[in-house]
Amino acid sequence: MRELPPARGPITESLFETLAAPPHGADWSGLRRLDEAAEPLSDEDLQLALYCCYELHYGGLPGVDDRWEWNPWLLGLRAKLEDVFERALLDAVGAPDDSVAPEEMDLALRAIADADDGPSLSRFVELRATVEQVEEFAIHRSAYQLKEADPHSWALPRLSGPPKAALVEIQADEYGGGRPDRIHATMFARSMEALGLDSEPGAYLAAIPGFTLATVNLMSLLGLHRRWRGAIVGHLALFEMTSSIPNRRYANGLRRLGFGPQATAFFDEHVEADAVHENIAAVDLAGGLARQDNRLGPDILWGARALATLDARWAKSVLDAWQDERSSLRTAAPKAVASL
Ligand SMILES: [Fe+2]
Ligand SMILES: [Fe+2]
């Protein structure tokens, strides 16, 4: 990230002003708006603030002292933001209370995947999207894909035995299996470049709406809290189980628009890789964790449902904008964003 995005309200204003100075005690008591976000799952100010708090644990923030990462006052703000986000998730998804026999975990996850009857963004991209819409799609996805797999890696030290081995097997592929050019995040960066976009992480953060940032914040929330280790496993399992077919469609859409292998390699890779990951994730990782500790079963399924819920909202918001012939981004033309 080259520079912090513009603030979107009192929370990000106060956060960015605080982070500009060396670590110190910060007073957030003036931020009463924290509890007032009417739609926390798409609130611009709340989701951007949370995304930036989490970013300190990934690539860091430009011009921000790395010691802020573990500053207790900053963590205090993050905890308040997470509390609002988590309560909104529980409202939207319901409480984690579905139980299932460990040996049926993969079937229960499959049922969640099959129940997803939201509008299909991948079908739209395959058949109808314009070049500008495909660019918008890549910009939305860049919020996660340029650090693909990292949020799920937080689960590694929280697992042991068979589910840990399964997660490592998946993540090894996500990180290129020893080949830097095959790191999925790097392959996504190459796709962005083939589309004429800036592949620097955070280059388009100002343009990415809260409803998209929420899909990434969900992963960071679940990955960074040990108590949610079941949910981050369920999230990854469903992610892998629902990836192969949409990625084939995205690749087809890019080819339809005349883009070549550099643009499509990331998506083609996922058609193959995730067909393999799907089984490891559902049976060995999610099923393996449930066999180890069946008390985590409801959380595993909840993580999957949370992913399905936020992704459906994201796809609907993007498609609604396109149907109205609007940009789905906060600022319109991506090329103009690139030159900001
Ligand atoms: Fe991947
Ligand atoms: Fe994968």
Image (spheres, rainbow, N blue to C red):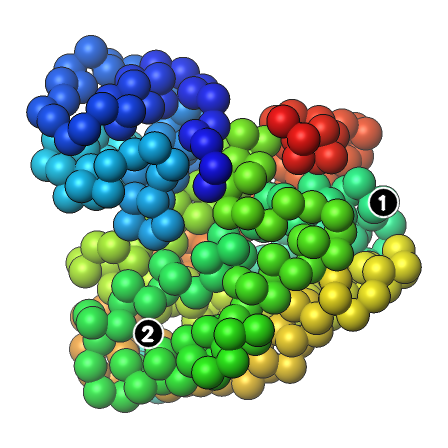
Q: Quadrant of residue 7?
A: top left
Number of residues whose C-alpha sits closer than 10 Å to that of mark 2, classed few (under 14), some (14–19) or many (20 or more) = some
Q: Of the residues under marks 1 and 2, which one precedes in the sequence?
A: 2
Secondary structure beneath dot 1 equals: loop
Q: Quadrant of residue 163?
A: bottom left
The answer to whether residue 153 is left or right of residue 320 is left
Name the residue rendered at 69%, 46% in the picture.
Answer: 197
Q: Position of residue 214 (x, y in %)?
A: 44, 41
Q: Position of residue 1 (x, y in %)?
A: 46, 41
Q: Image height check: is 143 above or below 159?
A: above
Q: Image height check: is 17 above or below 161?
A: above
Picture mark count: 2
Disc number for residue 89:
none
Name the residue rendered at 40%, 84% in the picture.
Answer: 169
From the image, tell me which residue sits under label 1. Answer: 130
Name the mark nearer the viewer: 1 or 2: 1
Amino acid on which disc 1 is placed: Thr
Q: Image height check: is 333 above or below 67?
A: above
The answer to whether residue 275 is left or right of residue 49 is right
Q: Nearer the viewer, residue 98 or 162?
A: 162
Q: Quadrant of residue 182?
A: bottom right
The answer to whether residue 43 is left or right of residue 31 is right
Q: Are marks 1 and 2 in contact (CB under 8 Å)?
A: no
Name the residue rendered at 53%, 56% in the picture.
Answer: 145
From the image, tell me which residue sits under label 2. Answer: 100
Q: Nearer the viewer, residue 266 or 180?
A: 180
Name the residue rendered at 81%, 29% in the picture.
Answer: 325
Amino acid on which disc 2 is placed: Val
Whether residue 36 is visible, yes or no, is no
Q: Nearer the viewer, residue 258 or 19?
A: 19
Q: Position of residue 168 (x, y in %)?
A: 35, 81
